[in-house]
Image (cartoon, rainbow, N blue to C red):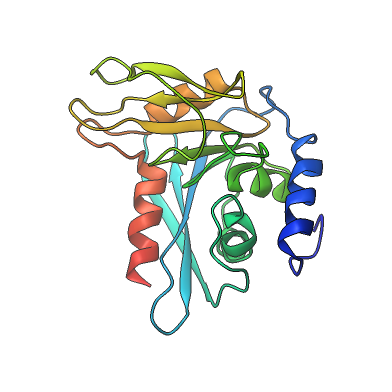
Amino acid sequence: MLHPWDMTIDEAGALQSRLAGLVEETDRLDTVRLIAGVDISGVRSSGVATAAAVLLSFPELQFLEESRAVGVPRFPYIPGFLSFREAPLMLEALKELRGQPDIILVDGQGRAHPRKLGIACHLGLLLDKPTIGCAKSRLVGQFEQPADEPGATSPLVYRGDVVGCALRTKVGSKPIFVSVGHRVSLATAQSLVMRCTLPGQRIPEPTRQAHMAAARG
């Protein structure tokens, strides 16, 4: 563990700014044979949420196993601080996988974050593993719509820096937002996300399956 989870908003923001300097945006990953996706369900009326991790073979994208972790988030819902709310359960779910993924796709932001430390970056640092942020919506930055064809991209720019890309995965659908988590370049992240997306789907298969597993509770 890099830090405790019990802290104030100001302490959490300061920690994000400090940890952002530790994120590596170059490829430091071996041959990818196993790829994981991780997501978390919304908090139910009971206050309980479910995180799910799914392990697939790569490049075949065959399902191998899944694991879940159930608990009550201890941090409030505040945009930009979701890792403090969601990462503890995601870590538990990932820990229960028998296989060890070579890279993890996270349903959330990586560098595309106000302090350049979204949940994908945070998990990557905590696990010391390559991670990619793969979000369904934008948190920060400006972009132009990519061409309406699978694989088309456009840069996501925030305060003068390219922090990710808008990636069109399906004709006629909104783009998804890909950003570096840890130990991977943006170019590799784009390529892997596209290779993980089945024809006719908008969401890459690892996080799509993790989302469904988390929703099952």
**Percent position (x, y) of residue 89?**
58, 66
What residue do we see at 54% from left, 53% from top? Answer: 79
Q: Is residue 194 left or right of residue 16?
A: left
Q: Quadrant of the C terminus?
A: bottom left
**Residue under the image location 61 percent in, 24 percent down:** 159
Tell me: 112 left or right of 14: left
Question: Which residue appears at 79% of the width and 50% of the height?
Answer: 15
| Outermost residue toward the bottom in this view | 46
Percent coordinates x, y for residue 49 in the rendering? 47, 72
Task: State whether residue 76 is above or below residue 81.
Answer: below
Q: Is 159 displayed left or right of 143 in the figure?
A: right
Compared with 63, 204 (above or below) is above
Question: Where is residue 166 shown, x and y percent of the image?
Answer: 41, 25
Residue 142 position, x and y percent, is: 46, 25
In this orientation, which residue lies closer to the viewer: 101 or 2? 2
Which quadrant: the N terminus?
Answer: bottom right
Near-viewer residue (135 or 114): 114
Q: Is residue 177 visible?
A: yes
> Quick one: 133 or 193, which is closer to the camera?
133
Residue at 37%, 18% in the rendered image: 144
Q: Is residue 191 above or below residue 56?
A: above
